[in-house]
Amino acid sequence: MAVPEGTGAEDEANHAAASPTESAEIVANGDLRVELEGGGKNGAPLLVRVDRAHLRKASRYFHVLLDSHKFAEGSALQDRHDHLRSQGVRPADGPNGLLPRIRIGDTGRMGPCPEGIGAVTLDFFRVLHGLPMQRPRHSVAFLANAVILADRFDSLPVLSAYIKAHRLFPSKDPIPGEVLTALAQEQRDRQRLLICTLLDHPSWFGPATGRLVAYDYDMRHATSTAKSVARSAVAQGLWWSLPDELEAELLHRRECILETLHSLQVGVMESYMSRIRQCTLGYDSSVQCDDFQLGQAVRFFNRIGTLRMSSNLYDSGFSDPFMGNVKRLIANLRQFPPYQIDGNHAHCGPRTKLIPALDFLQTVLARETDMCWTCWRQDRANYRWSDVEPARHWRLESDMAAWKGQRCRESHRQAKAMFTALHRVWNEAQESPFHHGE
């Protein structure tokens, strides 16, 4: 809420005594001062001298707020200007202490950046006045905070035009040779996505969404004290709650991919638990071969951390969701050894079922992990995975035969059908009437 303040030099002195406030001039002939809570260094208030006409032209928020016929702020501003003129003082030439002041308590959910919040705020107001920013280069965090300010004050078109005209978007993603912690990389990608979404800048969208879905750097499920402390220092930025439905979509896509991998693992074990013989050699030892392969599968999945043994008698609680790298998880699953109960039983084990399925999954994920900007913006109802009616049934064999690297929307459709399906068939044993020992 903006609050009108400052009807004289006495208010200036009283306010200065009550709160250490930074002051700056955007334009020397400004006729108004705007105080922004948290806009200065270390969260201090920032008081900037600005020009009413420029603000109203560049920002729809200020256009309405400073209208003398609509809000108290605009009316008080006009009254103060009339008073100064009656004293023979042009507002643009008046000393700071005589100018009207408007205080704005909410400047948006900004977060930390190397240049400092004060630098972001000053450069943002310079852009609103048609002036160049003070720095020729900026961090992604700087640009993300400037976008948050522009969104808060309804001036995104002005900032977008300036950033594109001055080519402020870094051309490399990621920057060659740059090494970031997992926390810093996730924050950087989230900042990029915020900029993409609000400034309609597509080039960062695919790689950043792909990393968030696949790598899950993620503080969303953080449990350790160290991670909790780390997140508390950065989580205030708007990028930790991405707008335009993107936050929910990213999380849902990751959950769908993990659930698909889970169903593959379950399907492999179920095939050896069914009454359909998996060992096709016809030896007297075929029954023992299937039992052996099931035991080895349980041991392997447990060893790589994708299977947890629990009891139906009592369970103290569910385990946390998988927080690792999906691509590394698939690589680990591919390490399933070619177990044999003896030298006669080659090619009997789960590896013969896992590898073709994982090959197909890797092919699909290589194309579909990075989200498609065009389809997200123009065909979201069909492209999204969240809040949609899932496919009821999906079969690996039929989809492998149909997949030929289709064009964009057909590829998206097939991937969505697989990853959101209610039931998946990975092998013939899952379709048998004897499945689950019936």
Image: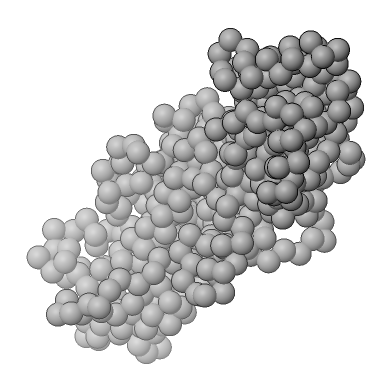
Residue located at (30% from left, 37% from top): 389
Q: Which of 319 and 45 is in front in this view?
A: 45
Q: In which quarter of the image is residue 119?
A: top right
Residue located at (30% from left, 53% from top): 424
Judge from the rendering whether residue 35 lies leftward or rightward of residue 327; answer left or right.
Answer: right
Residue located at (58% from left, 10% from top): 69
Image: 344 above or below 227: below
Residue located at (74% from left, 12% from top): 82
Q: In which quarter of the image is residue 357?
A: bottom left
Q: Nearer the viewer, residue 224 or 376?
A: 224
Name the image quarter holding the N terminus.
Answer: top right
User: How far across and down, in percent of the image, does residue 147 sit?
Assistant: 68, 36
Q: How many marks?
A: 0
Q: Which of 294 and 222 is in front in this view?
A: 222
Name the image quarter holding the C terminus.
Answer: bottom left
User: How far across and down, in percent of the image, does residue 202 sit?
Assistant: 66, 34
Image: 101 above or below 224: above
